[in-house]
Image: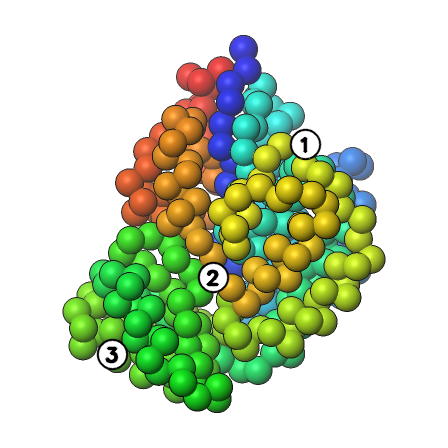
Amino acid sequence: MSFSAFLAFPGQGSQHSCMLSKGGLSKLALSSEYSPVLECCSDLISHNVYKLIEEGPEELLNQTSVTQPILLLCSYLHFQKLINTIDIVPTYYAGHSLGEYSALVAGNSLSIIEALTLVRKRGELMELAPKGSMSAIMGLEYDIINDICSTLSMDENFHVQCANLNSPSQTVISGHDEAVNKAQDLCLSRGAKRGIKLKVSIASHSKLMLSAADEFQHALESIKFRMPDTKIIHNVSVNTASSTAEIPSLLVSQLHLPVRWVETCQFISTLNLPILECGPGKVLSGLFKANNLDQYFSTSDEDFYEKIKDYG
């Protein structure tokens, strides 16, 4: 008996060493059906992708232009294992930032090879963008954080903005390093419980990515998108695309506009569906909990298939 579910795909930050073996994906990854996908990813990053995931070095695994195709690859394999193991009918897909590409592949809007090529280019362009930083602000209302960022950003060379609206208690800010540091200090003075600088040198989902977004638009022109066969909730609009022409525009905008995950979770809450985090790690499961959702599961959980069988 099949069951319906909402599938969500993680973004950058969910990667970890041994993602394939710990995810029970090694046999699948090395099979004759999927080894060509690994070879494509290896060619794109100029490293043996299986060896890099399983043996490191971790510094290379965490390099943006390497992380993005590898994380997409691992989420794709999680998805393939899922749909080949249980009788599931995905009703909606969503992805957190980079995870949106996993959703597009799952929805047959583009092929895994096309997506790997795109996210490799995306990562390279992000690395070439002006340097910046990001910080997770904990325990302070979004409106206060947004006001602080807006007030500080009068000078185009001192810019900071809300980048990931993850939960009512967690908003990630992004921008020029000094502006992020100042905004973090002001947030703490206004009552934030914590400010955690992320281990990145790029300012994702901020105006510092505008030049990367312009360049990325050219890369997207070579891809012929198809309408997804399952509805995808996009980060920028918290809605589905109305046409294939809208999809590239949403992906370009996503580079410099916020990930509206709180609103995505609010939408999910109206569906009364089990939520499956499909990919490495359990970052999204933590965010689902922080957004007061329940009935969420992670394919990275060792007991996932045991837990989920009750829905079948």
Question: Which percent across, then down, holds residue 19?
Answer: 55, 49
**Across the whole image, how many numbered discs are drawn on residues?**
3
Instruction: Name the foreground residue: 286 vs 5.
Output: 5
Name the residue type under label 3. Answer: Leu
Determine the secondary structure under disc 3: helix
Q: Residues within 10 Å of mark 2 (few under 14, many from 20)?
A: many
Name the residue type under label 1. Answer: Asp
Instruction: Name the foreground residue: 206 vs 177.
Output: 206
Q: How is the image coloured?
A: rainbow
Q: Are marks 2 and 1 in contact (CB under 8 Å)?
A: no
Judging by the rendered image, the residue that carries numbered circle 2 is 258
Q: Residue at x 50, y 41 (%)?
A: 8
Judging by the rendered image, the residue that carries numbered circle 3 is 186
Q: Is residue 308 above or below residue 241?
A: above
Task: State the CA–CA distance, disc 2 to disc 3.
Answer: 20 Å
Instruction: Name the foreground residue: 225 vs 72.
Output: 225
Q: Residue at x 76, y 46 (%)?
A: 225
Q: Residue furthest top?
A: 1
Q: Is residue 178 above or below residue 80?
A: below
Task: State the CA–CA distance, disc 1 to disc 3.
Answer: 45 Å
Q: Residues within 10 Å of mark 3 (few under 14, many from 20)?
A: some
Judging by the rendered image, the residue that carries numbered circle 1 is 229
Q: Residues within 10 Å of mark 1 (few under 14, many from 20)?
A: few
Task: State the CA–CA distance, disc 2 to disc 1.
Answer: 26 Å
Name the residue type under label 2. Answer: Pro
Q: Are marks 2 and 3 in contact (CB under 8 Å)?
A: no
Question: Which percent across, then down, holds residue 284?
Answer: 42, 47
Q: Are marks 1 and 3 in contact (CB under 8 Å)?
A: no
Q: Is residue 237 above or below residue 200?
A: above
Asked whether residue 189 is in view, the answer is yes
Location of residue 128 by image quarter: bottom right
